[in-house]
Amino acid sequence: MAKRKSLKGDSCPVARSLDVVGDRWSLLIIRDAFDGMRRFGEFQKSLGVARNILADRLQTLVAEGILEAGPAADGSAYQEYLLTTKGEGLFMVVVGLRQWGEKHLFGKGEAHSRMIESASGKPLQKLELRSRDGHLLGPSDTLVRKVGSEAGG
């Protein structure tokens, strides 16, 4: 299989982000880290991913500063992976994907995991994009100003 082209130098922030976390295993590892998983074996059991693929994705996430690897908190010989501040910045991405999946990928009444506020036990509000003055924005209310162009596109 041919190695995919790196998007690290791309002028689009979405492309650069996908270069780092754009495969399913990376985002699922990050999801599991938000759910409290820390050890290789926990990720492997949860995901059912091949060990070599998991090792590669963990190594990449550490190299990119999304996870940090360190000795296990219990003093055992195991290594633990913890989200960094940069990794925690992906929380809204994971919640956004979750909410999109809940809306579009499950049938009416179909059971699925739910994210709730830990303090109240209540469901989260839908993520919304708002303007600086507070009104709701949709796709037709925004544009991307490409590098080197005066107008958006």
Image (spheres, rainbow, N blue to C red):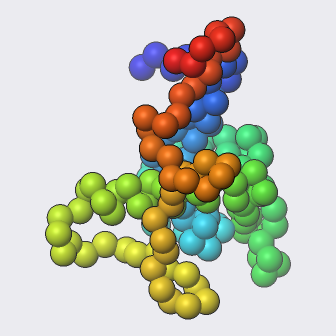
Q: Which residue is drawn at 27% across and 55% down?
A: 104
Q: Does the rendering let one see residue 57?
A: yes
Q: Which residue is drawn at 49% across and 37% down?
A: 141
Residue 14's place in the image compared with 79, above or below, is: above
Q: Residue at x 55, y 53 (%)?
A: 135
In this rendering, would 57 be left or right of 138?
Answer: right
Residue 21's place in the image compared with 105, above or below, is: above
Locate residue 68: give its quadrant. bottom right
Residue at the extreme bottom of the image, as rendered: 120
Quadrant assignment for the N terminus:
top left
**Between residues 16 and 77, which one lies in front from this camera angle?**
16
Residue at the extreme top of the image, as rendered: 148
Locate residue 78: give its quadrant. bottom right
- Residue 34 spot, x, y in % from top left: 61, 67
In this rendering, would 95 be left or right of 150?
Answer: left
Residue 28's place in the image compared with 61, above or below, is: below
**Between residues 48 and 147, which one lies in front from this camera angle?**
147
Q: Which residue is drawn at 77% across and 46% down?
A: 65
Q: Does the rendering let one see residue 54?
A: no
- Residue 63 spot, x, y in % from top left: 75, 41
In this rendering, would 122 be left or right of 108?
Answer: right
**Between residues 61 and 51, which one lies in front from this camera angle?**
61
